[in-house]
Image (cartoon, grey):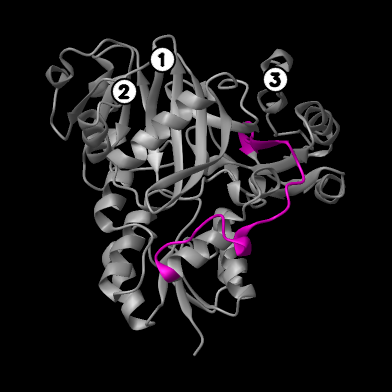
Amino acid sequence: MKQTVLVLGGGSGQLSLIAGLIEKGIRVVLQDRDEHCPGRILADDFVPLDTCDAPGAENVALKYKVDAVLTAGTDQPVLAAALAAEKRGCPSLVTSVTARALTDKEVMKAQLNTAGIRSPEYRLAGPGDGIEVLKGLRAPLVIKPVDSQGQRGVVKLESPEDFLKYRDSSLKWSRRKRLIVEEYHTNREITVSGWVYRGETLIWAVTDRVTRDFPPHIGLCLAHRYPSAYAASRQKEVAEISRKCVKALGIENGPIYFQFLITDTGILVNETAGRLGGAYEDISLPPVCGNNPVEILIGGALSGNADPMDTRYRVARTAGAFAVPLMFCREGKIADFAGEKQVLNFPGVTSFSYLLEKGTAIGPPRNSVQRAAYLVIHGEETVEVNRILKKTWPRIKITDTTGRQLLRNTLGYALNPMLERSVETD
């Protein structure tokens, strides 16, 4: 009998997962609130529900008698997937208890603190709370919904008094109507991508997550770079903290995606997630780590665990470096795109796509939903990746009705090492 899998999310970050399931002859039921999401045309069945709608996912899992529930490249649906799998009684890489710790910053912070793992000092807040709840914190501060993603509702507070200014707008992004307010640390950010198998942690890659602030909004990711220039001499420390996080959060099986801050006082844990990263790690990782994350994810979801060293999940290592620029536009309205075929045909370019539609109105940068395009480049070393970046970037065109280039010039954020970094010109 043909197997059926419920996939939560049909955006660009889930296309590899959906395609991988289809290639295996597995029926795909797709749940996404966006009826025009790109994954819909690939799926066998489509259900127009929010990916975080756990009761909805549970009903869908039962209705279609699915054999597994999956998501990738997106954070919050991990909990809905675990709950739906439990309701259906099918295998799941992550239990709902662990999924809650991975998707709720209040639970995550408590468990990290109990284990003695360093993260920014914080306080919890909710509707109606005043600045008295921030007592003991040193400004500047960062306000975050406990259960959101993609930098939605994340704002830097220059003083405690700013809390009242942004409290309610940030709360709109929280389903639980809870906020974390934590101390801000000047930092360089890295990500850890890997897999946990029976409690043992395999790290695939440590990358630089290069961000820029658009005050009051902070931490908008403009590129991922591998190998990490920020953590080049701290690989053992990063690995040890990663293993401690895995144990503290009760992760036994499945993908991990951790964000760490390298500060003047040491490494702090910023975020933890139990999914493939949302910056196209399904494409960038295989050539440098020798594993196919999507294949492992599918195999693991259908069985409840998957050994990443299994030969079925191994691929040839063909590169030693990569860069993934995540592109944004200036304010305006998109009228046209150009250069896609030229970029895709350039040696070293693994993937490239525009993400927004013509007619999209672009406002001030706030969160990752506003990404206009992405590019994945592989090379034997960083010098080669840098060269390809410089050659392909001028070919990417996103224009308004007057022909004005809307693409922000953020090439310097993708270049590795930091010695080559340039400042955005607009």
| Residue 56 is at least partly visible in this image | no
Which residue in the structure is indicated by mark 1? Answer: 266
Amino acid at pointer 3: Pro
Which residue in the structure is indicated by mark 2? Answer: 118
Mark 2 Cα-neighbour bin, 10 Å: few <14, some 14–19, many ≥20: some
139 to the left or right of 421: left
Q: Quadrant of residue 329?
A: top right
| Residue 420 position (above or below residue 154) | above
Label 2, secondary structure: give it.
loop
| Residue 387 is at least partly visible in this image | yes
Q: Residue at x 60, y 31 (%)?
A: 222
Mark 1 Cα-neighbour bin, 10 Å: few <14, some 14–19, many ≥20: few
Q: Residue 379 appears at what percent x and percent y?
A: 79, 37
349 to the left or right of 331: right
Q: Comparing marks 2 and 3, which lies closer to the viewer?
A: 2
Question: Which portion, as a residue range, is magenta?
Answer: 303-332
* Disc on the earlier residue, 1 or 2: 2
Q: Residue furthest bottom?
A: 1
Which residue in the structure is indicated by mark 3? Answer: 417
Q: Which quarter of the rendered picture does the C terminus lie within?
A: top right
